[in-house]
Amino acid sequence: MDMAVLDTSALMLPIEHNLRLFDELERVLGAVDPVVPDAVVAELDRLSDSGGQPGKAASVGLQLVDRHCEIVPSETSNADDAVLAVATQLHVVVVTADIELIERAHDAGLSVVRPRGHHHLILEPP
């Protein structure tokens, strides 16, 4: 089974865009093992304390990590850098809604799964 590395913005999509994240990942990639760097978990934890819509989205993201994802160690506390490092090391796709991270992933030769519209994901090759 292939893997995909999810970032903070991807894990917040279910609340922010009413997107069924893991159903969409399976539709786009087939069976996939989602992995999340520990730096992303730390960022979600910080955001979950902020309240409002972002706080709720981050809290749901943490629940999704607990239910569906493997947490992997990262060598940096910067979530985006950790996502890129893990994806590069494992040679797997990045799942994100972050425009800057999409560009960095493409520059690194990585495929990206990103939102298209409010309810769907698409796969972009490098």
Image: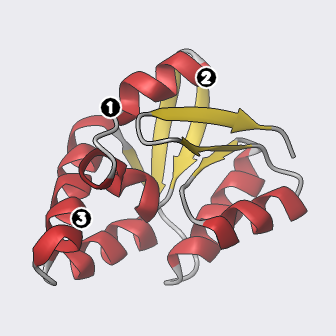
Q: Is residue 1 visible?
A: no
Q: Which residue is mark 2?
A: 29
Residue type, numbered disc 2? Leu
Q: Position of residue 69 (x, y in %)?
A: 36, 41
Instruction: Answer with left or right where residue 58 lies relative to residue 11.
Output: left
Q: Which residue is mark 3?
A: 58
Q: Residues within 10 Å of mark 2 (few under 14, many from 20)?
A: some
Name the foreground residue: 90 vs 94.
Answer: 94
As helix, strand or loop, the secondary structure at mark 3 comes to helix
**Residue 85 position by quadrant:** bottom right
Residue type, numbered disc 3? Ala
Q: Is residue 75 above or below residue 99?
A: below
Q: Which residue is mark 1?
A: 20
| Residue at image location 24% in from the left, 65% down from the top | 58
| Residue at image location 28% in from the left, 41% down from the top | 18
Q: Which of pointers 3 and 2 lies earlier in the amino acid sequence?
A: 2
The reply to whether the C-beta atoms of the residues labelled 1 and 2 are less than 8 Å apart is no
Q: Position of residue 92 (x, y in %)?
A: 71, 41
Q: Quadrant of the N terminus?
A: top right
As helix, strand or loop, the secondary structure at mark 1 comes to loop
Label ID, residue 9: none
